Amino acid sequence: MDYRFDEKKFIESFITKNTQSLRHIPDNQFKLFPYKASGKAQAPIVTELEDVVSGFFRETLNQKIHSIKFDVLCSDLLEKLEVNEEDLEYFKDMIKNLFFKEDNFIADNLGLYPYQTVLNNKSSENLAHFLFSIFGMNEADCQKIENIKEGHRFNILEKMIIKAMEAKKVSEIDKYSPYFVIKTDIQNKFKDDFYFMLEIGMSSLEDLANLFAVYYFYYVSQTCIILDQFCTGKRDGEVKFYYALDWEKVSKNRLCCESGWKILQESINHMFSHAITLEVLNQTLDEKMYDYIAFGEMAKENEETDIAIAGEVKRAESVYCSYIRDYNGFVDIEFQPSSLKTEKAIRHLYQCVMLQFLNTERKRANQFYNEKFLEFCKMRWVKNRKKSGLILNLTERDIIFLTKICLRNEEKIRLNDLFREYEKRGIYLDGTSKEYLQEFFTKLNLIDKKSDSGDAQYVRRIL
């Protein structure tokens, strides 16, 4: 067995030297989510992903980008241009109006995204790196993006700005450790949609932010569910989350009420406890990262290995609990049944972590961490339906966007196939919502009924 919990490493990571008190710092040994257990002032919540798009493209360059200053940019451009003295102020006003908002450089073109002013929001940068990592972007992907960018249409000024920026001496970006990918079957789905959009010119900040919002939510929501399944989770597992259309009325017995946000919200509340549990378990001298599924796979090799890993987990729990002096309810936590001793031990450690958060002053850190994703969901994907409560929601904008990327270059798609394409992206609709969606497409005059296919309904391309 390779797995060994290292107490010395745990003390270095979790215990303050001066007071010998416990500190919970996730995303160190085990990189799960890009969040901090700090309030909004120290770690702002990212709900709009336009800045994240720019950070994502900066990752592809693997270079630090210097902020573009208005005066410096004008000077760089004027070195390459001949502008009459009487036209100088007009030229500067044009640059200001086209590329700046106040003092910030604003990008609205694929080639300029990496140079958009970074608004000193570390949360956006962290999220950009997280998405770049969990979407499985590699050197080949970065080169492909560069090739697409070179074939993109730019006006003369945009070309000059890009050349001016590329001529700057910049260093490589700081190397970040990759995030551990829990759900492994979304990378190809994302890349297929991403490259399709870039290749057809569907590359505005708004469109790319919409794509990132779909897959960010898809990955993290499913990961939350998989984590709650501990060693029995599956990397390609899928829980069906049902949405309602923005304009339809819903009742409490609908799938969108029972099998949507209601289930997900509970799992989101466990995010910090899982992050810390996995951080504790990964206090090893080995650089390898272990998630619950990996522990389960090792434990299934044979009974001896299962017993040995469970023993290491119990030792980790004993060390962890020994430093918690403001909660004494650990002895009352029962072991939950499992066919694996390793899973029983991990679940017990998780309960210890979760209950000390819920019953001590550290509950605020737990809240701060979980709300980073919770608030994004509420702002982007959730709607309050009053008596029916909070429900996952699709707006007309979402539907038009999703339909465009589902049709690809086809002129039309069978309606049932379109529903299946939605589901490939983690979006499920019940029968009632499907009827409302059909009515929506009919009103837009996008429905065809082919006589040679019986009652088959087709949705035509949305321009």
Image (spheres, helix red, strand yellow):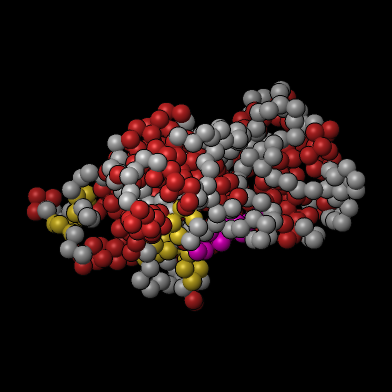
Q: Looking at the image, can residue 183 be seen?
A: no
Magenta residue check for 20: no
The residue lying at 22 percent from left, 44 percent from top is 409
Q: Tell me where residue 317 sits by quadrant.
A: top right
Farthest front residue in view:
85
- Residue farthest to the bottom, as pictured: 387
* x and y percentages locating residue 175 in the rendered image: 60, 33
Question: Going by the picture, which residue comes out furthest to the left?
Answer: 451
Looking at the image, residue 314 lies above or below residue 1: below
Question: Quarter of the image containing the N terminus?
Answer: top right
- Magenta stretch in the rendered image: 369-379
Q: Residue at x 66, y 38 (%)?
A: 30
Residue 123 x, y percent position in the rendering: 59, 51
Looking at the image, the residue that sits furthest to the right is 19
Q: Which residue is at the front of the view, 413 or 399?
A: 399
Q: Main secondary structure of the magenta part?
A: helix
Q: Is residue 19 left or right of residue 253?
A: right
Residue 233 shows in the view: yes
Count of residue discs: 0
Considering depth in this image, is 342 or 202 the residue closer to the camera? Answer: 202
294 above or below 322? Answer: above
* Left or right: 94 in relation to 368: left
Q: Could you say where residue 319 lies in the image, as x and y percent from the top left?
A: 84, 40
Which sits in the foreground, 81 or 21? 81
- The quadrant holding residue 194 is top left
| Residue 376 in picture, x, y percent from top left | 53, 59
On whether residue 373 falls in the magenta region, the answer is yes
User: At 32% from the left edge and 45% from the top edge, which residue is drawn?
Assistant: 82
**Residue ID at (69%, 39%):** 28
